[in-house]
Image: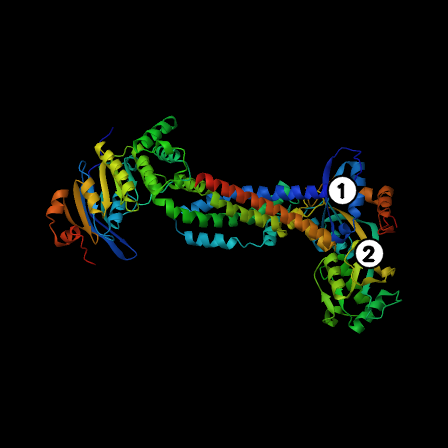
Amino acid sequence: MFQLDAELWRIVLLSLEVSLSAVLLATLLGLPLGAALAVKRFPGRRGAIVTLNALMGLPPVVVGLLVYLLLSRAGPLGELGLLFTPGAMIIAQTILILPIIAALARQALEDAWREYEEQLRSLGAQGMQAALTLLWDSRFSLITAVLAGLGRASAEVGAVMIVGGNIDGVTRVMTTAIALETSKGDLPLALGLGFVLIAIVLVLNAGAQLVKEAAQRRFG
Amino acid sequence: MSSSILPLTLDNVAYASNGQRIIAGVSLSIEAGPSTVILGANGAGKSVLMRLMHGLLRPTAGRVRWSEADPASLRRRQAMVFQRPVMLRRSALANVVYALQLAGVPSGEREAQARAALDEVGLRHLAQRPARVLSGGEQQRLALARAWALHPEVLFLDEPTANLDPSAAREIETVIKAFDAAGTKIVMATHNLGQARRLGDEVIYLQAGRVLERAPIEQFFARPATAEAAAFVKGELPWV
Amino acid sequence: MGVALAAAIAGFITVASTTSTEQSGLFRHLLPIFTAKSGIEVRVVAVGTGQALDIGRRGDADVVLVHAKPLEEKFLAEDHAVRRQDVMYNDFVLLGPKSDPAKLAGTKDVVTAFQRIRAARAPFVSRGDRSGTHFAELEIWKLAGIDIGREKGPWYRDTGQGMGPALNTAAAMDAYILADRGTWLSFRNRGDLAIVVEGDKRLYNQYGVMLVNPAKHPSVKREMGQAFIDWLVSADGQKAIADYRIGGEQLFFPNAHE
């Protein structure tokens, strides 16, 4: 059983590493994208918004398959040797949750922009400057968008299974471990892992909520 | 300091939105000096006219011309205070510093100038308070401090006290008078006749998007030239 | 897993193998022994046989270890590997419910058993996923003279799943199912299932190992991959395979030199 604990630790840490890395990357890319869409007017804007919203529903297993074809030695990015590594899993999850974070951010920021636009433009804030100010000021309501991305990344199994290969000790994360134990018929273990996963996600969410509330008290 | 951005000239400016005509062929010139009050009933188009002048809206016909061509310089030398102040989620001081940053003031000087502006409006003791938890009157004073820090040539005010109680409104009027005394050109929209009398030197009377009358303030109130203006002054507004 | 490393880690290879092999626990037993000796880390991607060979075709694995000889020979013919070697075999067992609707008790002949299942239209779960187990099952239907594609009915459940989930389904449905012994021995959710036929030579499941052709796939780690294969078929490797037990029972029978 002690062996199991060490192994469980490794699986949990890898899950956190992969999902949190993906959330970080998707946030760095997605928030500016959402801000730009919220603030800038350009031809085709409506189509871009509709497409982004639709991409929120990308099936993880499809993303996994596409990334697999990209990273396979037989594919265009095969030289990178990323397939079956945690790096590939991070890439796949980033692609998966980027639309979620960007689309939800866009919605929140568009609402905020309605409030701020006149004043910011009156003060002379243009384009990128205004978008960044808007982003920073809305940072606490954007936590919701980031959490949605984190939730999706932690929960998915389709993408990481295909691009990671669920390799024992290398690319096995909580969700793929649960899938494996279920398919082995070891349901109690699978359930146990499932509860650990839920507990972790709950803790992360609770933490974020506390931060949000404290900040709201401090900044108004 | 380079030459004034005034006079501001509107050439047959019109503005329509969603098929509705809001401003119809306004031609006028705003000169330096007297405080200009734009009077009119709700829906007359005062807010839209102000935004056209300030540059937040583009006219659908006609031209808005300042005496300064460079847009960045133009932006820095006029400021606007809105009916509802919009503050960032930062301290009161930081909000003023932000405006100074946008205006290109070197970072070493921003805080000192911001504090001076807060002093001017009597908000020194609230410098570190989160701006969004201040009262309505305090936020509006903060908006004025923000504008003050920029030392604008022209200050637009769109019904600045419409949401405030009388004592807060008086405080705002005091600050506006200070702006005026410092040489800032005041252009203010209001439907509060008493306020217009207290603060204005001349009146532009707007109705249904047209300028019906323009006169020095006492003349407008004593002898309005049009029947509609007379009705407005008497406090009776014909429903359009 | 508590084996001390005798050699420093020199690198790793990727081996594409099957879910049933991994789920039997063989790799957890075998690989640390090899790594301790050679310093080579072995990363196993365990998927269905079809997918494992596809991974090899793309050059995403260095070595392929599966148990479906016809498909392996096709792989060879396509030049994705240069040589195929026998490594070991395990066997399949026919599992059935206590209620035994096809009346198989006492049968030693798996072909007869299949014929009786068909005749009784007893519930039967198939993997239906192009896996080695699936192909073995199809072979037996053929030997029994049954064209299962045409003769299947509602009693025949084509699940398209791996061995574990298929066993779950069979246990829940009280159905017959062909399974590899390894997965069965580790399977916890047995319901009323038990072994009804075993030991028939036609139930033997041969494993073959191939190095993915480095001429065709330059990224293949030729030396390390070959070292692994050489070890598997060596006396040491073959003994390690034979030493693997579940509940005291041997699962895999080394036959590299037969």
Q: CA distance from mark 1 to mark 2?
A: 25 Å
- Residue A33 in the image: above or below residue C181: above
Which residue, given by chain and number where applicable, does mark 2 sit on?
Answer: C181
Image-quadrant location for residue A138: top left
Query: Subunit of mark 1?
Result: A
Give the numbered dot on residue A3: 1
Can residue C57 be seen here?
no
Q: Residues within 10 Å of mark 2 (few under 14, many from 20)?
A: many
Q: Quadrant of the N terminus of chain C?
A: top right
| Residue C257 image position (x, y, % from top left) | 87, 48
Give the numbered dot on residue C114: none
| Residue at point 18%, 57% (across, down) | B238
Can residue B83 be seen here?
yes
- Secondary structure found at label 2: helix
Pointers 1 and 2 in contact (C-beta within 8 Å) = no
Query: Subunit of mark 2?
Result: C
| Residue B22 image position (x, y, % from top left) | 25, 53
Kindly identify the amino acid type of the residue bearing the numbered disc 2: Arg
